[in-house]
Image (cartoon, rainbow, N blue to C red):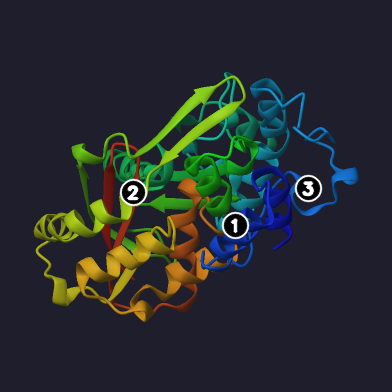
Amino acid sequence: MDILEFMQRVYASSEIEKRKLRFLYQQSGISLRYSVIADYSKHVHDWKFYPQSENLEPFPSLEQRMAVYHKHAPLLSVDAIRNCLHNIVQHHEITHLITVSCTGMSAPGLDLQVMELMELNKNIFRTSINFMGCYAAIHALKLADALCKAESKAKVLIVCTELCTLHFQREATVDNITSSLLFGDGAAAALVCNDDSDFNGMHIDGFHSEVIPKGKRDMAWELSSSGFLMTLSGYVPELIEEDFGAVVIRALEKTNLELKDIDDWCIHPGGKKILEAIEHSMSLKKEDLAFSYKVLTNYGNMSSATIFFVLKEMLDRRQRGKNIFASAFGPGLTVETFTATS
């Protein structure tokens, strides 16, 4: 509700528009979101990042936004990594580092910053997955899985760090209002190792990816001089509801599973309507997506980091031997999936 007041000041020019915006926020299914920018929950006189002016002029440039990213992203990444490792693996044991982000880029970038802050080996294999959007964490898992199959002693560290709220746009378009309603900041990390490791985690069974070309322009993420611009049309949930079931069937065929074999659903909570579309498409109940709804309520959509938040909820409450189906969506319209055993 604190964020709503900021958005009403910028987007709503009348009391009617303010009520409409309040209704959207109340119906979002989101109670909390986080941001590295304190302005969103402060009085205008206490703003530090945005100008204290009626039209937010001079509006923050891309350079200013990236300066904030470079300050906060490495520290959040390191916090997420330490939370993941729990001193089970020593820093020098990490053989591969994959950084994931679509909300900030530079060279040298986040991978080198993390390597230095964590004092990882200087000869560590490192790579970055940039600008792939909400499904990028699964793409990173797919790469980590391949690396582990290629090297028996591989210990692959993935960290997804997204500062989505850096890219707030002031024009009252549907895309901008929707983005400012859904997205928050967050970081999450995962460690991927071979099957002979003694870690208390999940076993990855297989991956499947498809592109739904008819949704190519309904979800997009582009650069501009005033930040990154999101396109997220209201047609996306309809597309997902229409095509998701067939994608799931084709994905399960790869691992010799059937729908009746799936015990838990790990779905990227891109928004309440997207989760409802999954329910309708797969004839699921809301409680079947309880972990996804919980993350949406407590954090909003954090782009690539979000699916790891859902997995963490499952890890904390899992039962052994359960089959998990996971999926996330992003620009393309791309559907990335994987199956796992708890």
Q: Earlier in the sequence, mark 2 or mark 3?
A: 3
Amino acid carrying label 2: it is Phe
Identify the residue at image location x=50%, y=60%: 309
Q: Place residue 259 in its image quadrant.
A: bottom left
> Can you tell which mark lies on residue 21?
1
> Can you tell which mark lies on residue 123?
none
Q: Report the Cα–Cα distance between label 2 and label 3.
A: 29 Å
Residue 181 at x, y percent in the picture: 56, 53
Crowding near pointer 1: few (<14 within 10 Å), some, many (20+)? many
**Disc 3 marks which residue?**
38
Amino acid carrying label 1: it is Leu
**Disc 2 marks which residue?**
329
Identify the residue at image location x=43%, y=55%: 270
Q: Report the Cα–Cα distance between label 3 and label 1.
A: 21 Å
Mark 1 or 2: in front is 1
Mark 3 or 1: in front is 1
